[in-house]
Image: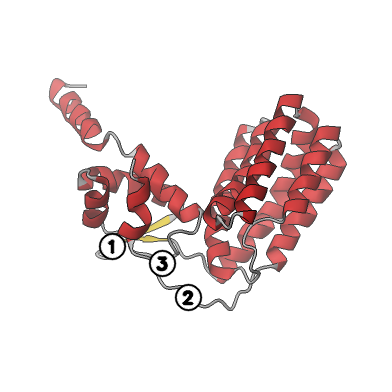
Amino acid sequence: MDHTRETSLKQDSERTAGWHPIYDSLREAIISHRLSPGTKLPEDELASIYSVSRTIVRAALQALAHDRLVQLKPNRGAFIAEPSKKEAREVFEARALIEPKVAGLAAAAAKPADIVRLRHHLELEHEALHAGRDADAIALSARFHVDIAEIADHSILTGFVRDLVSRSSLIIALYWRRRDTTCERHAHQALCDALAKGAESDAAALMKSHIVDLLSGLDLAREKKEASRLADVLTADKP
């Protein structure tokens, strides 16, 4: 590589360094439903909110687009993704195929420390729900499924679960018809108990039932929610 090209690549890297906190902040706001699907994400406004350059914001938005949480529309800008009704069903159908296998693997691999961590997670979920901290409860509920995948120690399947859970959060924001927009606590408790016993078939069956129940809670005749102001949502958690 010649010196000029090496210098150019180094400069590009320096210009986009620091996008990860922006990515993390936006991703959390999306996953927790504080920002609604379809919300526009103007680069200049985000740059002002986070006190960074538009180049850094653009890098964060591109990473979110890679995760399919954001759509980049030519000549229009970036928007939080709005999964279609067909995609909504397909995402949960994919979860119903993948996550029971993951739960079985996790039951076989779980160590006592893993169970302690999951039970503590359940306590945090319960506290968030009872305190009315819906955004926290939603994010914790999603994280519980990723935690189980990480216990299974299968990197490819964990990647699938992380992607599907993120997309599920958008789908729930659009199509959930029940008041409780998080996973039911008793389902997570039963899963945790099965993992603690090393009951692979029970864990798989419980996860299958749980995901099917989530799919049954979708209302594919949704009403569009009013978008929130970016500054109101994001200023409090600037990195």
The amino acid type of the residue labelled 1 equals Pro
Q: Tell me the SS state at disc 1.
A: loop
Question: Considering depth in this image, is 16 or 30 the residue closer to the camera?
Answer: 30
Disc 2 from disc 1: Cα separation:
23 Å
Q: Earlier in the sequence, mark 1 or mark 3?
A: 3
The structure residue drawn at horizontal position 86% and vertical position 37%, both measured from the top left corner, is 199
The amino acid type of the residue labelled 2 equals Lys
User: Between tags 1 and 3, which lies in front?
Assistant: 3
Disc 2 from disc 3: Cα separation:
9 Å
- Residue 192 relative to residue 125: left or right: right
The amino acid type of the residue labelled 3 equals Gly
Find residue 22 and report its horizontal and vertical position in percent: 34, 44
Q: Against 234, is 162 above or below?
A: above
Is residue 111 in view from this perspective?
no
The structure residue drawn at horizontal position 77% and vertical position 40%, both measured from the top left corner, is 192
Residue 90 tag number: none
The reply to whether dot 1 and dot 3 touch (C-beta < 8 Å) is no
How crowded pointer 1 is (Cα within 10 Å; few <14, some 14-19, many 20+) is rated as few
Q: Against 220, is 195 above or below?
A: above
How crowded pointer 2 is (Cα within 10 Å; few <14, some 14-19, many 20+) is rated as few
Residue annotated with mark 1? 74
Q: Quadrant of the N terminus?
A: top left
Find residue 124 and report its horizontal and vertical position in percent: 63, 43
Residue annotated with mark 3? 38
Q: Earlier in the sequence, mark 2 or mark 1?
A: 1
Question: Considering depth in this image, is 176 or 237 the residue closer to the camera?
Answer: 237
User: Between tags 2 and 1, which lies in front?
Assistant: 2
Disc 1 from disc 3: Cα separation:
15 Å
Q: Residue furthest left?
A: 4
Residue annotated with mark 2? 224
